[in-house]
């Protein structure tokens, strides 16, 4: 039967009567690309299955966590075991230390680690800690980087000469937004300028060491080292938000790839193995300020809960103990990008392809992409056409030009070949789209 989303359309309409916009996180609504989001019934390995009986090769992987593939048998079995022991105690368990140890061994800059329930919670807590440690109030973030939805980071750059941020959402107070300064990604001169003006007031710089929330954008040669140097010079803390890149671009994260030691790191996504987890950690002298070791308050009823810890432990253990897993992931991701590129070139399209480890992105522009402004030069109409044709062909890519793609260990060579073939059909549609929009 031909591809259709009849049941999903009905489900989406009903969901909107109970949930704002029908979804519990905005990007799921397909607002960027239009159309109806498939409602998912179940997932296994590299596949998603929707309620209309369509199946898709999935390159979203729940936005990053599912690096082993969906419903990995070892993770499922460990969770079933864990459930029968009770789902939450609000008291210490051995599991929490086990996961903290695994994280610490993978990311040695995280000398002490606190578990929370989401990436948002991790970045929110880490900023409070940075302000407390430095006794300074201002934060620098980068335009196009996303760190979760709490007020201090839901900020965009002020217009014109104003460097102090303004709210990026109604409800964020101007006072809070004003404490955050936004700078262009990969723009060292801009960062230097801000430090020259506000250096003594900057508590911390928070950065995605590889940006994944404006599409995938790589740091330029030497950029992260320069950010490390300038933060050190001014006594500001450097925070790597590795919620996406941790255990994704490499087992030990982007900081291992680029050889940079941040003061503090945020994690999430993969360390929860598909359950809700975030974590932050770093230098012992800083982390010891966290309550109850120190005076900086931060708590959580379900933090470190046994199910999430179990999924995380099982996932990290498999990731670290499967020989060649990351090499294979990187190789498959490269093959995928090269294959799609070749299909695009057949139709005369020059796109920007970015890849590191098991993370990738493509921009519908023939110009280099190195920050949010250059990412926005992408031809969104062309991307949306490409996206919908891929979906019809059974390939589930992120429903926005400004999101990254994720490979999993469960993707087979056949999956990748099928994806590349589908991209040929999709580029043909993009060519038609261009003809009709001349
Ligand atoms: C996903 C993400 C977050 C937010 O994590 P949630 O678990 O969605 O709150 C923060 N930072 C980065 C870099 C992310 O990719």
Image: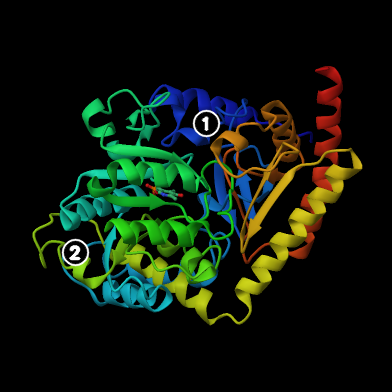
Dot 2: element = loop
State which quadrant residue 365 falls in.
top right
Looking at marks 2 and 1 on the same chain, the residue that comes earlier in the sequence is marked by 1
Q: Determine whether the beta carbon of the residue marked 2 sits less than 8 angstroms from the nearest atom of ligand 1.
A: no
Residue drawn at x 13%, y 54% as measured from the top left: 297
Q: Residues within 10 Å of mark 1 (few under 14, many from 20)?
A: some
Q: Residues within 10 Å of mark 2 (few under 14, many from 20)?
A: few
Residue drawn at x 40%, y 31% as measured from the top left: 157
State which quadrant residue 87 falls in.
bottom left
Q: Indicate the position of residue 372 as horizontal and vertical percent values.
A: 55, 37
State which quadrant residue 32 falls in.
top right
Applied colour scheme:
rainbow
Q: Residue furthest front?
A: 196
Q: Compared to 221, does 54 lie above or below?
A: above
Disc 1: which residue: 29
- Taking depth in this image into account, of 105 and 60 the one nearest to the observer is 105
Residue drawn at x 37%, y 54% as measured from the top left: 276
Q: Indicate the position of residue 33 as horizontal and vertical percent values.
A: 62, 29
Q: Indicate the position of residue 177 as horizontal and vertical percent values.
A: 28, 32
Quadrant that contains the N terminus: top right
- Taking depth in this image into account, of 60 and 430 the one nearest to the observer is 430
Instruction: Say whether residue 311 is left or right of residue 427.
Output: left
Q: Compared to 272, does 437 lie above or below?
A: above
> Of circles 2 and 1, which is in front?
1
Residue 21's disc is: none
**Residue 146 in view of the camera:** no
Instruction: Say whether residue 343 is left or right of residue 38.
Output: right
The answer for how far apart the CA atoms under marks 2 and 1 are is 35 Å
Disc 2: which residue: 89
Quadrant that contains the C terminus: top right
């Amino acid at each position: 039967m031909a591809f259709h989303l009849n049941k999903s359309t009905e489900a989406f309409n009903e969901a909107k009567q109970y949930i704002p916009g029908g979804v519990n996180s905005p990007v799921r609504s397909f607002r960027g690309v239009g159309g109806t989001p498939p409602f998912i019934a179940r997932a296994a390995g590299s596949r998603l299955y929707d309620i209309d009986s369509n199946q898709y090769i999935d390159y979203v992987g729940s936005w990053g966590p599912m690096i082993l593939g969906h419903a990995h048998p070892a993770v499922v079995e460990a969770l079933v075991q864990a459930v029968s022991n009770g789902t939450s105690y609000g008291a210490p368990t051995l599991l929490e230390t086990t996961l903290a140890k695994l994280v610490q061994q993978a990311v040695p800059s995280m000398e002490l680690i606190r578990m929370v329930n989401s990436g948002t919670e991790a970045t929110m807590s880490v900023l409070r800690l940075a302000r407390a440690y430095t006794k300074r109030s201002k934060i620098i973030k980068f335009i196009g980087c996303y760190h979760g939805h709490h007020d201090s980071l839901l900020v965009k750059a002020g217009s014109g000469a104003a460097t102090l941020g303004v709210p990026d959402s109604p409800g964020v107070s101007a006072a809070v937004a004003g404490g955050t300064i936004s700078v262009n990604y990969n723009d060292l001169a801009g960062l230097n300028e801000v430090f020259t003006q506000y250096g003594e007031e900057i508590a911390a710089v928070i950065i995605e060491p590889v940006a994944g929330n404006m599409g995938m954008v790589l740091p330029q040669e030497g950029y992260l080292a320069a950010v490390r140097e300038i933060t050190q010079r001014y006594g500001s803390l450097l925070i790597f938000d590795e919620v996406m890149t941790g255990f994704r671009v490499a087992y030990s994260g982007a900081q291992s790839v680029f050889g940079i030691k941040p003061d503090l790191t945020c994690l999430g996504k993969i360390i929860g193995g598909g359950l809700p987890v975030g974590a932050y950690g770093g230098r012992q002298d800083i982390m010891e300020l966290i309550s109850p070791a120190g005076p900086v308050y931060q708590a959580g009823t379900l933090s470190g809960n046994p199910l999430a810890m179990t999924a995380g432990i099982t996932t990290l253990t498999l990731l670290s103990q499967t020989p060649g897993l990351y090499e294979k992931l990187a190789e498959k991701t490269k093959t995928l990008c090269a294959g799609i590129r070749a299909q695009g070139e057949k139709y005369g399209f020059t796109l920007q392809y970015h890849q590191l480890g098991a993370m990738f992105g493509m921009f519908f522009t023939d110009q280099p992409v190195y920050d949010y402004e250059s990412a926005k030069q992408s031809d969104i109409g062309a991307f949306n056409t490409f996206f919908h044709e891929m979906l019809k062909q059974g390939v589930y890519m992120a429903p926005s030009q400004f999101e990254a793609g994720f490979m999993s260990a469960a993707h087979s060579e056949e999956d990748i070949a099928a994806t590349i073939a589908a991209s040929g059909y999709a580029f043909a549609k993009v060519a038609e789209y261009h003809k009709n929009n001349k």
